[in-house]
Image (spheres, rainbow, N blue to C red):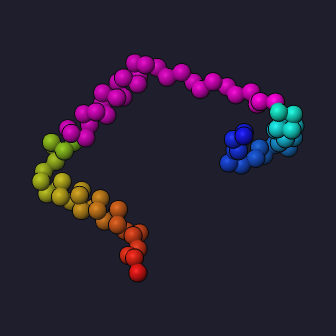
Amino acid sequence: MPKRSSKPPSDPIQAAHSILAQLTGEEPRRLPPPEKDPMAVELGRRGGLKGGKKRMETLTEDERKELGRKGGEARWRNHKPKE
């Protein structure tokens, strides 16, 4: 079964082409996803792996408590208790 898109094309010609392709069973042409630069991926990963630990090392105990308190409040802000 073909996947449905979240919204139809806004261009009427594209919409007609899409409908015709579905009726005839023709697969739409899709562009391959862009290639990622492996060096950039590795560089971003390296920073991401040590970023959180390094940040926690530089914060004071009071700052860490404040971040934890704010995070807890944000998680439970829209929570409705069970009746």
Q: Quadrant of the N terminus?
A: top right
| Res. 78 image quadrant | bottom left
Residue furthest out toward the front: 1
Question: How many discs mark residues in the rendered view?
Answer: 0
Residue 13 visible in the snapshot: no
Q: Is residue 49 magenta?
A: yes
Q: Which residues are magenta?
A: 26-54
Q: Residue 81: horizontal and vertical position, in percent? A: 38, 76
Task: Please provide percent x and percent y for residue 39.
Answer: 40, 18
Q: Position of residue 42 (x, y in %)?
A: 36, 23
Would residue 62 be found to the left or right of residue 46 on screen?
left
Q: In the image shown, does 59 or 33 lie closer to the viewer?
A: 33
Q: Quadrant of the C terminus?
A: bottom left
Q: Quadrant of residue 34?
A: top right
Q: Is residue 10 magenta?
A: no
**Residue depicted at x 31% and y 65%:** 73
Image coordinates of residue 53 in percent, x first then y, are: 21, 39
Observer-nearest residue: 36 or 79?
79
